[in-house]
Image (spheres, rainbow, N blue to C red):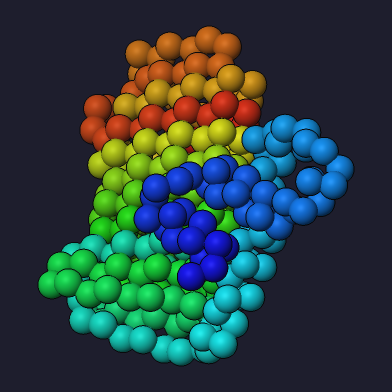
Amino acid sequence: MSERLRILKLLEEGKINAEEAARLLEALNGGESRKRHGPPHAFSFWHTMDSIPEMVTSAIHGAFGHASAEETLKFSKKQKLELKGVSGDIDISGKDTDIITIEKDGFVGVNESPDTLQIKALSGNLEITVPKAINLGIKGVSGDLNIAHVNGIIEIATVSADICGKDLSGSLKADIVSGDVELEYSMIDKIEIKEKTGDVSITISKDTEAEIEVETREGEIDCEFELKDAVEKNGYLKGTINKPGGKIFIRNEYGDVAIQKK
């Protein structure tokens, strides 16, 4: 196994994080140059994040280009879909079906158990059709994520991605480094979003019953609802939409937050 593949395998298994993987790949790609020209300047965090997609994609295509044929895969209905993607866009759509269908054009590995389907995508885009009632666990380094018509528990952890959700119901937990988030929910149990940089927008029904708490270090907060028991100050908003029900908690360090009426 090449050094590049060892690094990607460690990232895939969660033994190193995205920043560490980027540093290792950069060291591998430019080691000889640095030996000639002396020690490098320290990477900034965001420079590292921006450089991940090109480095990872290059390493994958060099190693697995022969295995990245387009293909359609089908599996029986599961309670949960777990997906790890390094590079590429992901589209997940819920439909009235008992089959999970995966349209892929990159290097993808799949493990199946009675309750869970695990997908590991090292490159390429994915279009996935799932039953509407399903739980999702998604981890990604680079690539946009679109989810529609899903009712369940969704957990997302991404480094660099724009996330769009339409006609969703249930719960969401998202930890995002960079990228905008636009969500449309018809029913909410609990939404918890932690964002480093990027705007967050949630659209919900005017009849939604929920308690909200929003924090932002440098962004603005805009809420179209008239809140009960509202607490509002610079970079902070808390209150109840209609009456207690679901929970919405958003912490965004360097972006705006909007809660809008559908």
Is 8 in front, or is 176? 8
Is residue 234 toward the left or the right of residue 192 in the image? right
Residue found 31% across the figure and 86% down from its top = 74
Is 1 in front, or is 52? 1
x, y percentage for residue 254? 62, 28
Residue found 72% across the figure and 51% down from its top = 31
Is 9 in front, or is 166? 9
For this orientation, the residue located farthest to the left is 114
x, y percentage for residue 11? 46, 54
Can residue 119 be seen? yes
Marks counted in the figure total: 0
Is residue 142 toward the left or the right of residue 187 in the image? right
Residue found 31% across the figure and 62% down from its top = 82
Is residue 107 toward the left or the right of residue 213 in the image? right
Is 145 in front, or is 132? 145
Residue found 35% across the figure and 42% down from its top = 173
Can residue 151 be seen? no
x, y percentage for residue 154? 33, 52
Q: Judge whether 105 appears above or below 251 on screen.
A: below
Q: Judge whether 82 appears above or below 109 on screen.
A: above
